[in-house]
Image (spheres, coloured by chain):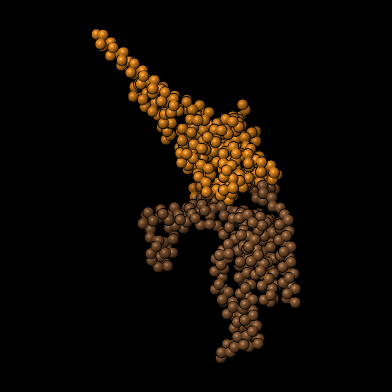
Amino acid sequence: MSDFIEARGISFSYAMEDDPNPIRVFEELDLKIKEGEMVAILGHNGSGKSTLAKHFNAILQPDEGQLLVNGMDTRDNNKLYEIRQDVGMVFQNPDNQIVATVVEEDVAFGLENIGVEPAEIRRRVDDALERVGISEYKAHAPHRLSGGQKQRVAIAGIIAMRPRCIVLDEPTAMLDPAGRREVMKTILDLNRNHGITIVLITHYMDEAAQCDRVVVMDSGNVLLDSNPKDVFSHVKMLKSVGLDVPQATEICYEINKAGYPMPTEVLSIKECADELQKLIERTYAAKRKAAKLSQKK
Amino acid sequence: MLKDITIGQYFPGQSFIHKMDPRMKIISTLLYIVMLFLAGNLMGICAGILLLILMYQLSGVPMNMVTKSLKPVIPVVIFTSVLNIFFVSGEVLLKFFFIEITREGINLAILMSFRILCLIAGSSLLTYTTSPIELTDAIERLLNPLKKLKVPVHELSMMMTIALRFIPTLIEETDKIINAQKARGADMESGGLMQRAKALVPILIPLFVSSFRRADELAMAMECRCYRGGDGRTRMKQLQYSHRDWIALTVMAGAIVVVLLLNV
């Protein structure tokens, strides 16, 4: 697999109006994202993860260094729209990214912008709505939908443009648990079955645990970058930068800390339950053995 | 509570008029208004009323909707009638001191009143049978030739679409802010006019701030989806005139001819 997004030593700072010193968000940052990967970016508020995400589709351009998307430099203003077609972006608040007053019109918005033929738009819109599972609402007004449905409309609007990568900036932060599940299911399906590269920025560790790779950012630096199991085994380090680990991992970590033999590289609830069962069985077996031994004596 | 407000007064249906191309509906409405103003005598106005009744029958919009749309214009109608009755000179019918009521005045008053009533009822039919989206779409396309005169037609219709899209969102938000301020002890129901106006300030300020934030985010989301103005843009839904629209145009043109003949 080749590198789809490649950041080479990029720096970015915000200029403040009344402050002569610009605020540095990150400096000399390197990051590579492979085609077809599903990457989670974690970090507490202000760690620069959203700013980084906005670099991926040339909404922001690096002050220094170079960011290549599919070989195109994001600082090349002639390539802006090509880059944005390749890298779609979904934001946190579904209300603020839906433009049209009818679901299908909104999904068509991006395609209309890039000048696709009407018949082709129709086909791609229907296809996109089908993929995210909201075809039955295509003639509805967006404000009548639930949060999860609205966010899926936003995703449909992006995938209708057939991007190769989708960057999602906390897409589930404003949703209820059911909405979060719907959206995560859609994202996973897009990655696993349609080969779309996913960059998921999130605060939910359980969502990050479902990705192939987790990048942890802290004050503009990449702190950890590995598979979820490895990253979440650094419980102490994550806590020190204001992050959590998935609940299942936390339980195992605490039991381990209390002195029981328990693996800490556990991510899902099921794994955790299995390990707990094993631990309980082991402990009982040991107790029974001890009891038998004492009876014999 | 605020959520149930409907935007515009669209009355969904499947009638001949509903299925017409929204552009032709706008053109027909304009032609109808022209016809009303060309009608110089009662016969012409009667033809206008007849046509109106026919159109409403065809659209399936209930008649009580018409009375609803006419209620707010009644003061205007009364005002113009009074002006016409008392201030038009001609053959005197009645005379109190210096006030004269003339035959021409009464004639003109009746003519003007029915003209205004037909005008409102006729243009209401347009909004009853056309959804706001169709309407903006049609306006954009009808005004398209003005682009050559540097009129920002696409931008205007985009603004209308976004405004329509955000009305329910902002209503919901207003509701939330009102509740939040009430929870903090804001009193919005008592006091005089000034006090009530003042009580609105803590609602409007948060609403403004959040609207700007929304606008900012929406602009970014639109940019992400390759929005760059109206140039080179295509549309998914294409509007096309059908036989219905030509029939409607013929009827309207015919009505104007009839009115002109009645004037002679």
Q: Position of residue A1 (x, y in %)?
A: 61, 26
How many numbered discs? 0
Q: Quarter of the image holding residue B129?
A: bottom right
Which residue is nearer to you in this view: A73 or A53? Answer: A53
Q: Looking at the image, which residue is at 62% across and 28% down?
A: A2
Q: In screen coordinates, is B132 left or right of A231?
A: right
Q: Looking at the image, which residue is at 56% across and 35% down?
A: A10
Taking the view exactly as shown, the residue that stands out farthest to the bottom is: B97
Q: Position of residue A209 (x, y in %)?
A: 48, 30
Q: Is residue A162 above or below residue B44?
A: above
Q: Is residue A247 visible?
A: yes
Q: Is residue B119 above or below residue A236?
A: below
Viewport quadrant of the C terminus of chain A? top left
Tell me what hue chain B is rendered in.
brown
Q: Quarter of the image holding residue A258?
A: top left
Tell me what hue chain A is rendered in.
orange
Q: In screen coordinates, is B125 left or right of A218?
A: right
Q: Quarter of the image holding residue B64?
A: bottom right
Q: Looking at the image, which residue is at 73% across and 56% down?
A: B243
Q: Position of residue B58 (x, y in %)?
A: 65, 61
Q: Position of residue A214 (x, y in %)?
A: 50, 30
Which residue is nearer to you in this view: A280 or A133? Answer: A133
Q: Is residue A288 above or below residue A216?
A: above
Q: Is residue A175 above or below residue A228?
A: below
Q: Is residue A154 visible?
A: no
Q: Looking at the image, which residue is at 60% across and 53% down?
A: B161
